[in-house]
Image (cartoon, grey):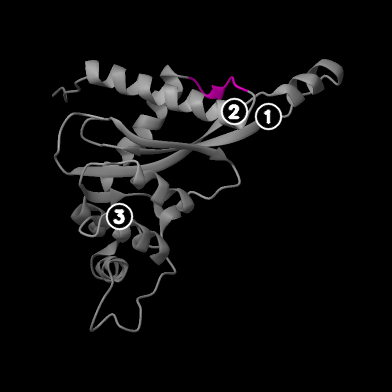
């Protein structure tokens, strides 16, 4: 983590990592076919610096939404906003964020079928305000207003991990795989701290 006390925007996302364990190796050797299994790497990324602020490796059965709280628990700096895609939509996520960062903006696109609560006119929730804004300005207008495009930088961090660290895990047990992924994230932060590419538009 960078040595700074500035409030940080957090982009949360997840990706799959391949596992080639003992069972798959045995099947390939004796049967001739392979069956890939997967783990999910959940990351909380600073979109400004590209640093990985928190990480968690889980089985593929664990839902993305259940990892929001554990990821935020790892971040000691003040949080001014949490950005995630529509898979994280729902009041439980808003509550989990509010418990850890009460003043943080929550920027998650509501599902197309989302409706405001009965108290929308008198006491709208943060999620309800997003729904109303989308109804008034459209989804693209909402995205521009809340700067939702910053979420793409979380996807960039995922891609950077897979390119530099790898798309799979070498360890065979889940505890060892968690250590492997955590080390990979630390290495990513070391490389990120040394410098990031600077892109400029050529006219």
**What SS does tag 3 mark?**
helix
Tell us which disc is closer to us: 1 or 3.
3
Query: What residue did someone put label 3 on?
Result: 100
- Foreground residue among 88 and 92: 92
- Distance between mark 2 and mark 3 Cα atoms: 32 Å
Q: Is residue 90 visible?
A: no
Q: Which residues are magenta?
A: 166-171
> Any mark on residue 36, and which?
1
In reply to whether residue 195 is colored magenta, the answer given is no
Single out the residue that lies furthest toward the right. 30
Sequence-earlier tag: 1 or 3: 1
Query: In the rendered structure, are the residues bearing label 1 and label 2 in contact, judged by CB atoms less than 8 Å apart?
Result: yes
Judge the density around disc 3: few (<14), some (14-19), many (≥20) Cα neighbours within 10 Å.
some
In the image, 130: left or right of 63?
left
Q: Quadrant of the N terminus?
A: top left
**What SS does tag 1 mark?**
loop
Query: What residue did someone put label 2 on?
Result: 18
Tell us which disc is closer to us: 2 or 3.
3
Sequence-earlier tag: 2 or 3: 2
- Distance between mark 1 and mark 2 Cα atoms: 7 Å
């Amino acid at each position: 983590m960078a040595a700074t006390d500035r409030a940080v925007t957090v982009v949360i996302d997840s990706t799959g990592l391949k596992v080639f364990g003992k069972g798959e190796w045995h099947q390939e050797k004796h049967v001739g076919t392979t069956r890939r299994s997967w783990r999910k790497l959940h990351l909380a990324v600073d979109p400004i610096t590209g640093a990985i602020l928190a990480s968690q490796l889980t089985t593929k059965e664990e839902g993305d939404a259940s990892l929001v709280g554990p990821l935020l628990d790892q971040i000691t700096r003040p949080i001014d906003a949490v950005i995630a895609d529509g898979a994280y939509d729902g009041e439980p996520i808003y509550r989990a964020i509010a418990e850890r960062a009460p003043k943080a903006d929550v920027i998650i696109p509501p599902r197309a079928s989302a409706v405001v609560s009965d108290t929308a006119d008198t006491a709208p929730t943060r999620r309800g305000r997003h729904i109303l804004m989308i109804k008034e300005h459209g989804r693209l207008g909402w995205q521009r207003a809340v700067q939702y495009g910053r979420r793409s930088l979380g996807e960039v961090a995922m891609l950077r991990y897979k390119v530099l660290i790898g798309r799979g895990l070498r360890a065979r047990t889940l505890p060892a795989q968690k250590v492997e992924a955590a080390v990979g994230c630390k290495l990513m932060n070391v490389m990120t701290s040394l410098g990031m590419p600077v892109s400029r538009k050529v006219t």
